[in-house]
Amino acid sequence: MIEHHHPHRDASIGRRRFLGIGALAALAVSTGCAEPFDETEPSDETATFDDAERFDVVVVGAGVAGLTAARALAEEGLGVVVLEADAIAGGRVRTDRSLGVSFDLGASWIHGTDGNPVTDLADAAGASAIELDFEDIVLFDARGRKVPGEQVAFAAARLEDLTRAVVDDADSGETFVEVLERLEPAWADDPLLRFFAINYLEFDTGDLDRLSGELADEGDEFDGPEVVMTDGYDRIVDLLAADLDVRLRVQVDRVVDEGPMATVWSGDRAFVAGRAIVAVPLGVLKGGNIDLSPALAGDKAEAIDAVGFNAVEKFLVTFEEAFWDDADFLGLAAAQPDAFSLFVNMNRLIPGSNALMTFAYADGARMAAGLSDDQLGSAIAANLRSMYGSGVGEPTGLRRSGWTNNPLFGGAYSFVSAQTRMRHFDALAAPVGRIHFAGEHTSRAYFSTVHGAHLSGLRAAEEVL
């Protein structure tokens, strides 16, 4: 079986112990840094900002990484403000309930529950979750015939074997597809193999023609089942954001580390602090949407360019009644598997919801991002008709994630491109002067995950303390 997230990673590595929020107090006492930064004697430079608001720490970005860092520091008595350009907190963790179904537009899974800090957060937030079985899949071929279970299992196992072979055979700088085509030239002609390569590997990482062959299995994971939130991942956001000073709709333009303090600018509004934490998505850094001064250079600039940031879109469709098989997953091994070919049966999460969740990745996601809701609904229904016949009607409701074209994100999550070296994640995490960095893209071990974002926030808070 291929686990949905990082199927080839060494799960034992994930049992390492991390510094938790509660441990920050002991760290602060031992280092003598628990007291707020002394701002009683501001310098001439910072004093010229008559309207500036002053804090110990300014956090840019109210995603899981930024909220985690802010909460850890606030619990140590520091004055912290979180600036968020969007209208809601949570970043790529957000839940839409407008169709009566808790639809997580971004993160849905806790990837391995044993020792995973997100498990503890979910428990503390009272968030319910259930395990979905990736082997419980009903797969159809292009002619609408159900694929026998043994053929499905064989194709999944074959992808595992080929992925290991690619990693073993790849030279530095080669893409996954380049190596795969050398080892298995006709792989794309096998609909089942292509289905799993796209829906399990490309979904998990990034464009296969950009994914690093030698690093395709990098990243650690936690033991235990993979579970999906049933009432919304944003329960964790609510927990992290509670009682924090989070300012919404504040678009940060510049972060300046000059003089004795750091200054964060939103238009002509200044926020002055002893430290700043930049916890925005890698896509924002790639887009140059925030001017950092002094400008990032050297390893940091190289890493921003080299680490990949993929395109993934999620869609929820509802129907008058459920016409599909009672399985956790449904799939169509069709000609274009990178869009609307894998479905999660939401009735398993929310009985009676009569809803399906489907996905688009890489080129499929970029294509889907340009479609109207009506066009999306028709395209998704067309694939379902290939599976369940002409009687399938149009969806009664549709919701979409919209990460790809949103300038506040610029994509979904980081991956190892052919230009990536693992040291680049360390470079993305490294502080520059008074500016610290957090986010899933700064986690060498757990990039592309919520727990990676959470742990990076704790690491950034530790650095500040």
Image (cartoon, grey):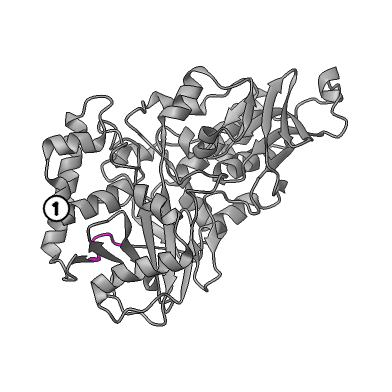
Query: How far across and how far down the image is residue 3, in percent?
Result: 28, 51
Residue at figure coordinates x 54%, y 48% from the top left: 406
Q: Judge whether 228 appears above or below 416 on screen.
A: below
- Residue 3 seen: no
> Which contiguous range is marked in magenta?
133-138
Residue 181 vs residue 368, the one in the foreground: 368
Query: How far across and how far down the image is residue 417, in percent?
Result: 35, 33
Which SS class for mark 1?
loop
How crowded pointer 1 is (Cα within 10 Å; few <14, some 14-19, many 20+) is rated as: few
Quadrant that contains the C terminus? top right
Query: How far across and how far down the image is residue 349, in percent?
Result: 41, 69
137 within the magenta span: yes
| Disc 1 target residue | 190
- Residue 103 seen: yes
Residue at figure coordinates x 36%, y 67% from the top left: 380
Residue at figure coordinates x 37%, y 27% from the top left: 422
Residue at figure coordinates x 59%, y 43% from the top left: 68
251 within the magenta span: no
Give amino acid for label 1.
Answer: Asp
- In the drawing, does residue 298 fall left or right of residue 259? left
